[in-house]
Image (spheres, rainbow, N blue to C red):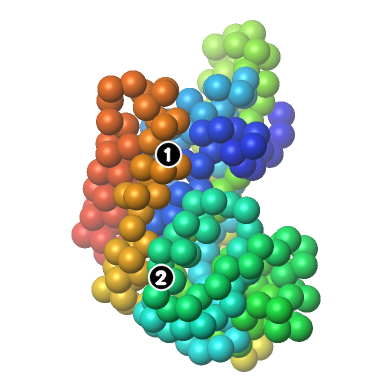
Amino acid sequence: MMVQCPYVNLVPGGMLNWMNWTVSSYDEAAIAYAPGGILYEVMEEAYKEVGLKHIFSIPTGLYGLGNNVRPLRTPDDMKNIKMRVSASLGFVRCMENMGEGTGLTLHTIPWADLYNALERGVVDMCWSLWSSLIEERHFEVLTYYTDLGFGWDTNWVAMNRDLWDTLPSDLKDAIMTAGKYANERDFEAHRRAEVGYKKQLVEAGLEIYYPTAAEKAVWREKANMPAIWEELCDPWLEEHYPGQNMSQTIRDELDRILADVVAAGG
């Protein structure tokens, strides 16, 4: 067994795990990534393709945008900013679209070099997580942070599928039940930890901006995610779910989850 980050060079269908604007809250993720959830089910197919059985997800949280130039309230606020990105193509496409017309420039820098790049002014901006702001010390080299929640980060506990197939049904049930409880525990533990992270960051002087739902909608619209899905997800989905228009099915279900969470006050 292992903790598996489903990067596409390892898991070709793994882009579904990382697509931007799929979920933008813990409440949404707890539905979409839980057993029976739409992203859980499609990731089951992705892991099956590479001989793995995924069991439960370990949340890392939501990505926001940190920078040293100005508070980011609208996409236009990214004017002439230099941003660090990785090779994660979905995130890159999302930032290209959200920054279109602003003069935003993207620079591929390894995660391990990000702190120094921000400290020396090689780049002005990065995406980061609440946990990374603290544990990677990003808050020391950032002035502003916008809690945009435009990407969800999660890893998976997975095991060899051939071995899984040899297990008796009662042991499979026990493993999946344990995974369910572990998933619930990790979601709650991480959500609680972020409360402490935010307090530490405010005390350290990081200026944090929390966009309204209407403001987030502007960023999401400019991201033009349907075009990114068409480029990065549709070929794999059509191969594995031929004729089912699975891309639209997934996005419709994610929209339903968002509407239900909002209606419930989440």
Q: Is residue 236 visible?
A: yes
Q: Give left or right: position of 179 versus 75.
A: right
| Disc 1 from disc 2: Cα separation | 22 Å
Up the image or down, 42 lies above or below 91; here it is: above
Residue lying at 51% horizontally and 42% vertically, measured from the top left: 15
Residue pictured at 30% horizontal, 71% vertical = 218
User: Residue 7's x, y, as percent?
Assistant: 61, 42
Earlier residue among tags 1 and 2: 2
Residue 210 visible to an observer of this rendering: no
Which amino acid, by three-letter code, is at mark 2? Glu
Could you say where residue 140 lies in the image, as x and y percent from the top left? Answer: 71, 83
Q: Nearer the viewer, residue 250 or 90?
A: 90
Q: Which residue is mark 1?
A: 233
Dot label at residue 193? none
Task: Name the residue at 62% across, 91% down.
Answer: 205
Q: Do labels 1 and 2 touch, CB within 8 Å? A: no
Drawn side of residue 213 relative to residue 175, left or right: left
- Residue 214 x, y percent position in the rendering: 26, 73
Name the quadrant containing residue 27: bottom left
Closer mark to the observer between disc 1 and disc 2: 2
User: Which label sits on residue 100?
Assistant: 2
Q: Amino acid at mark 1?
A: Cys
Label 2 SS: loop
Q: Residue at x 56, y 14 (%)?
A: 170
Q: Quadrant of residue 248?
A: top left
**3, above or below 192, in the image:** above
Q: Is 106 located above or below residue 92 in the figure?
A: below
Count of labels in the image:
2
Please rate how many residues cluster around mark 2, counting C-alpha atoms within 10 Å: few if below 14, some from 14 to 19, many from 20: some
